[in-house]
Image (cartoon, grey):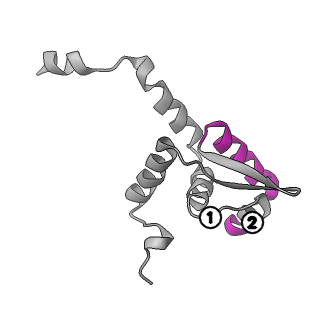
Amino acid sequence: MAKTILEHIPHTEDFQTVADLMKQMNDPSRLRIFWILCHVEENVMGVAALTDMSSPAVSHHLRVLRSNGLIVSRREGKEMYYKAADTDIAQKLHHAVEEIMEISCPKDDPS
């Protein structure tokens, strides 16, 4: 058994992407913002209102999420709007959050 697993153990460096992502997602507010942006496109003020956070705090979390490729932004006039990136990693993280928390997407909610 040990020899079989030894042949399939990835190198420590192979875990770096996941480790970096988990390090950046260690804040529950950031995870909450990410989850919200998986369901709606919103600007900083909208996210701040939804989360009862200050705009500077939301902006900080948005920068981290964007730098990790989990969200994307677009400009409309003077406003920037944010939403979850359409990537495999963002989708997997979205589903993992919902699976672990045993919640479902608002669009899946029958009420």
Span of residues in magenta: 49-69
Q: Position of residue 25 (x, y in %)?
A: 56, 43
In the rendered structure, find residue 46 and report the number of the disc placed on it: 2
Q: Crowding at label 1, few (<14), some or many (≥20) Cα neighbours within 10 Å?
A: few
Residue position marked by numbered label 1 in the rendering: 40
Q: Position of residue 28 (x, y in %)?
A: 57, 52
| Residue shown at 24% from the left, 20% from the top | 8
- Quarter holding the N terminus? top left
Q: Position of residue 44 (x, y in %)?
A: 77, 58
Predominant SS of the magenta segment: helix
26 inside magenta stretch: no
Callout 2: helix, strand or loop? helix
What amino acid type is highlighted by mark number 2?
A: Gly
30 shown above or below 108: above
Q: Are marks 1 and 2 in contact (CB under 8 Å)?
A: yes
Q: Position of residue 94 (x, y in %)?
A: 48, 53
Judged by depth in the image, the label closer to the viewer, 1 or 2, is 1
